[in-house]
Each structure stands twice: as structure tokens, then as C-alpha cells.
Amino acid sequence: MATLRQLRESHHLTQEGLAVAADVSPSTVYHIEAGKVRPRPSIVRRLARALAVVPAEIDVDAPLAVPHVVSSEPLVTESVTDVPE
């Protein structure tokens, strides 16, 4: 089993080239490769057909990327010993 990126690169395709061949959007390919989404089975079948592999060869079960959370809270930089009693 290989990641979508590994398979795409082994076929010398760009994300856009794979997207065209699989009839999906380039952003779909990007988001799958980045681990931001898990594709529906129908999308995996399209990608597999475009890459001439069986769907089971595409590893799409990688953990999703952890979203970046921005907090408005200030970063606490002082240590416990700096806090007055």
C-alpha cells in the first residue's frame, strides 16, 4: 500500500494532472495528500483508475492532519516561581 502522493509521483503526475485524469478537482487531490480529508470510496475508485491500481493500493487511512488552532489568549511565559504569593 502506498500514499496517494507516492503513487502520483511514481506515475510522474502533478496534482493537477492526476485531478484531470481522475475527473476530480486539484484541491481534492491536494486535501487528500495533505491528510485534511478522507475521500469517499467513489473518489478513491476514480483515483485508482487514473493511476492504474486497485483502490486497496491507495493508503487513504492515514490520520487526518491536526487542525491549527489560534488562540486569542496570551502565551504564558512566566514560571510558577515568578507568581507572587
Image (cartoon, rainbow, N blue to C red):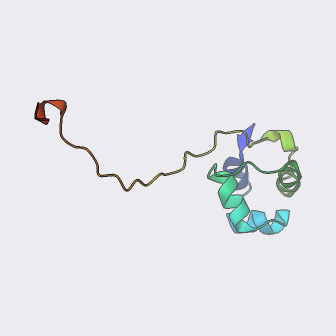
The quadrant of the rendering that contains the N terminus is top right
In the picture, measured across the screen, residue 78 lies left or right of residue 26, that is left
- Residue 27, above or below 62: below
Q: Position of residue 75 (x, y in %)?
A: 28, 48
Q: Is residue 27 left or right of residue 50?
A: left
Image quarter in which the C terminus is found = top left
The residue drawn where x is 66% and y is 52% is 33
Q: Would you say 54 lies left or right of 16 here?
A: right
Q: Nearer the viewer, residue 10 or 67?
A: 67
Looking at the image, residue 24 lies above or below residue 33: below
Res 12 visible: no
Q: Where residue 80 appears, x then y in whole percent?
A: 18, 31
Q: Is residue 16 above or below residue 73?
A: below
x 49%, y 51%: residue = 68
Closer to us: 43 or 68? 68
Vertical side of 23 occupied by 40: above or below: above
Residue 67 seen in this snapshot? yes
Direction front: furthest residue: 85
Q: Position of residue 67 (x, y in %)?
A: 54, 50
The residue positioned 10% from the left and 35% from the top of the image is 84
The image position of residue 8, as x and y in percent, is 72, 54
Q: Quadrant of residue 56?
A: top right
